[in-house]
Amino acid sequence: MTDLAKPATRAAPSVDAPALARRYGAWIVTALVLAVLPKIFTSGSALTMMSLMGIMIVFALSYNMLLGQTGMLSFGHAVYYGLGGFLAVHAMNTFARDGLPIPVALVPLVGALSGLLFGIIFGAVSTRRGGTAFAMISLGLGELVGSSSLILRSFFGGEEGISTNRTKLFHVLGLTFGPQLQVYYLIAGWCLLSMIAMYALTCTPFGRMCNAVRDNPERAQFVGYNPQTVRFIAFCLSGLFAGIAGGLAAINFEIVNAGYVGAEQSGTVLLATFVGGVGNFIGPVLGAILVTYLQVMLSDVTEIWQLYFGLMFIGMVMFAPGGLAGLLMMHAPLWHARVLHRVLPAYLLALVPGLITLTGASLVIEMSYLLLVKASSGTAMTFLRVPFDAAGPLPWVVAAVLLVGGFWVFRRTWPVVADAWSDALGQARTRAPA
């Protein structure tokens, strides 16, 4: 028997370790970080904050499927988050009352199916149009559901909402989900799975078609794809993941009220996505972490924390439209060329007067709020642990010096930063391979 007559044997594919590390390394690192974080931050408030961050990450990424991937600006995305939470909490009460063997870990699936169902219902109407028309329809649907949450008391519970008890559900492996640590790991697991699923969607042909519809719907239709169908599918999938976030929120808080479907919740996810950056997958993740942290921390510091949120949003849209992710991607060439250290001194030079300017502006805002809104409570206040009388002239002089002087110095550092950036970018281009 000759060699040609022998059956051919297929060689086993070689395992490319660097390729596998590039493909799965980021997710392995993310899983390890999520697992280790409770060992580092062990306080109850830290666990609560990290749980809120995980929920917001899923919610923001689901919104980014509409805005960042498909180019649909929605003002009512909280509808699917809230309805997913309401149906999840009703399901939890049903499971506990009837003694059904369904653990808490599967409750987010109820939220997912709810978000998908209402995504199909509302998406069939709203995705018929794109651009401004879609935004207005989403706003109308959000107001419709938000007003209904205070009218249909049997389902939404009125202003009190619907409460539940997650510890009464079926226990698996002795997990009662009473301690916040167990709830955190449940949220972290669903957050990781949702992130992987949504990232995988961006790498599929459907994800590329979403980008095509976002960039040029006429050309996408010309090559044979229906933009309305693409928008509808993306809308339904976005509602599915928003429902998962709502189900996780129902488990975490054990109560769902009208605020879940309100305009404020839609504005929060819009803010988180824009601040993080809609042009990159990691952008909404960064925005969700930052916005959640500021929400928790600023609310304990000042009563007008929402004003600072609005100013931050305006500043990001005006001066950094790419968000935090866009700023990071700008420095990627410098990082790869190992010249990032050349711009750090200039950044530190501008950071000090920038912080002084922010301090002066915050002082002016806080004193103005006290004198104009809360004058009946007195004029004594504390800023950065320094007590003083806001009605006196000295605090206003100090605030003016910090604001005007700090901005003057900050403005003079801009040419230094620009020169350092140009020099570092030129060296990065020189070191880049041809």
Image (cartoon, rainbow, N blue to C red):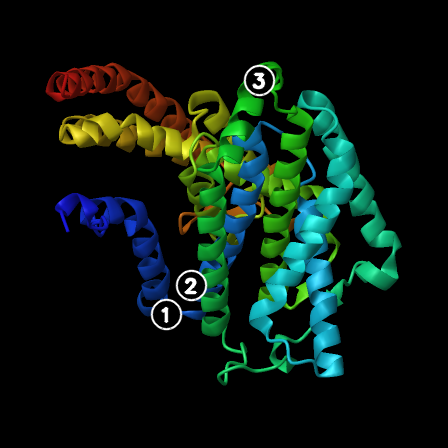
Quarter of the figure with the C terminus: top left
Residue of label 3: 223
Q: Is label 1 or label 3 in front?
A: 3
Residue 92 or residue 311, whichever sits in front: 92
Query: Label 3, label 2: how many angstroms apart (C-alpha)?
Result: 51 Å
Task: Judge the density around disc 3: few (<14), some (14-19), many (≥20) Cα neighbours within 10 Å.
Answer: few
Name the element at disc 1: loop
The amino acid sitting under disc 2 is Ala
Residue at 81% across / 52% down in the picture?
Answer: 149
Residue of label 2: 46
Residue 119 point in image, percent of width and height: 71, 44
Query: Label 1, label 3: how many angstroms apart (C-alpha)?
Result: 54 Å
The amino acid sitting under disc 3 is Val
Count how many numbered circles sit on residues in the image.
3
Residue 186 point in image, percent of width and height: 49, 67
Name the element at disc 3: loop
The amino acid sitting under disc 1 is Thr
Residue 250 point in image, percent of width and height: 64, 63
Q: Does residue 297 lie above or below 228 as drawn?
A: below
Residue at 57% across / 17% down in the picture?
Answer: 223
Residue of label 1: 42
Q: Earlier in the sequence, mark 1 or mark 3?
A: 1
Q: Is residue 96 visible?
A: yes
- Horizontal side of 216 relative to 351 (left or right) equals right
Q: Does residue 251 lie above or below 76 as drawn?
A: below
